[in-house]
Image: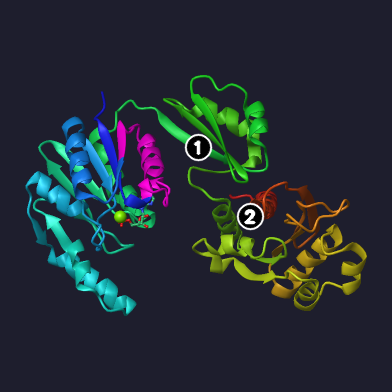
Amino acid sequence: MSARIELITTGTELLLGFTLNTHLNYIAQKLATIGLRLDRHTTVGDDPAELRAAIAEALARCRVLLATGGLGPTADDCTREVVAELLGRPLARDETIADAIRERFRRRGIAMPESVLRQALVPAGAQALPNPHGTAPGLAIEHENKLIVLLPGPPRELKPMFEQYVLPVLEQNFAPADRPVCRVFKVVGLAESVVEERIGAAPGVELGFCARMGEVEVRILGKNLAEAERKIRAALGPHIFGEGDDRLEEVVVKQLAAAGKTVAVAESCTGGLIAHRLTNVSGASRVFLAGYVTYSNESKVELLGVRPETLARHGAVSEEVCRAMAEACRRRSGADFALATTGIAGPTGGTPEKPVGLVYIGLATPTRTEVQRHLLLFDRETFKFFASQYALDALRRELLKSHRPA
Ligand code: AMP
Ligand code: MG
């Protein structure tokens, strides 16, 4: 039997419904990757008495207790103090942590409120887990054959800390040797039902599907995944763009970098979303040259040089204008590839010939230009995301054909 693991998430904002409790989802998923699962999860508000009771109850049951939130500098943050008191371990300031906090404020050029140094208090015998993304370190405490780990509330601080320090310790000490493994394949350009139909049965593994925005995840869980993986890859081929946490824009940036090629974008209905997604990826500057957000007809003429006659004859949302945008973008930017989008995001602005949801997606390459037409029947933001997804995927598939990795 594996060690009992419990999670306590803290924060009144979680109980009020102002903040979605993403820690539960994130931590449970990460534990699954090493064959562990949560036995119980509790959420408490920022109330010392409630928190104390929840921790005492959980410690009476579990081997590993993970608690998130309440390590910050404000008056409602009380996790560190409650745990120290409950375990009878006095708090003392760790000067290395205090210096790191002071240094963080100095580098940002802002005055440090004295209250911030509360975050340098460490219960006796606890190990501080460094937090490169914030001021509050995490804390790991071995206590009466139990492991207690306190983690910061902000997800962007918690996640790297969890992956770097907590997961390896849990894997080494608690992961079952003969455990099932989990893999997730990320699929683009096929509906969930089509993905399922193509794969059919996968004997020997637990097969699961999850439709996300603009992509489908295929999850397999089992002790030996090789046969199932072969079957899934054969069924879905190039529709699989990655695994696990891979994002489409990351894959595209990597492909471009590996091929030594560049891209530029001319966006109308996606309003800069493709540029945003590409520039979210570290290293984008090597492959991304320019983004033109040409929303009006005038800007398509002035910034890209689309001919007014083309706009007048076919309308801004047309295959012809999309083609002209992609080709002009490629020429003006000097990039190897250019993507262009033009469409009707809605909910207003549709006509019988050009309904809401219509979008053209153009890809200009050194040798040709292709334009896809889609009807994306979603709300505005989902429409924009799908359009950006199809555009990025058009480039991914082009690079897959022309620049196969060696
Ligand atoms: P704290 O350290 O508890 O003050 O939390 C700081 C920030 O992290 C706040 O913006 C919280 O809303 C956020 N946060 C705390 N716990 C969670 C959680 N379980 N899921 C998502 N966000 C959280
Ligand atoms: Mg809080």
Left or right side of 327 for 42: left
Quarter placement of the N terminus: top left
Q: Quadrant of ligand 1?
A: bottom left
Residue range of the region highlighted in magenta in the rendering: 14-42
> Can you tell which quarter of the image residue 304 is in?
bottom right
Q: Amino acid at mark 2?
A: Glu
**First along the sequence among labels 1 and 2:** 1
Cβ of mark 1 under 8 Å from ligand 1: the answer is no
Q: Is residue 203 magenta?
A: no
Q: Is residue 55 visible?
A: yes
Front residue of this view, candidates 30 and 118: 118
**Residue at the image position 45 percent from the left and 28 percent from the top:** 221
Front residue of this view, candidates 313 and 228: 313
- Please tell me whether residue 12 is drawn above or below residue 201 in the rendered image: below
As measured in the structure, the alpha-carbon distance from the residue carrying label 1 to the one carrying label 2 is: 26 Å
Left or right side of 125 for 326: right
Q: Is residue 19 magenta?
A: yes
Whether label 1 touches label 2, CB < 8 Å:
no
* Extreme residue toward the top, this view: 203
Mark number, residue 381: 2
Q: Amino acid at mark 1?
A: Val
Left or right side of 152 for 266: right
**Residue at the image position 24 percent from the left and 58 percent from the top:** 137
Q: Is residue 171 visible?
A: no
**Can you identify the residue that label 1 sits on?**
184
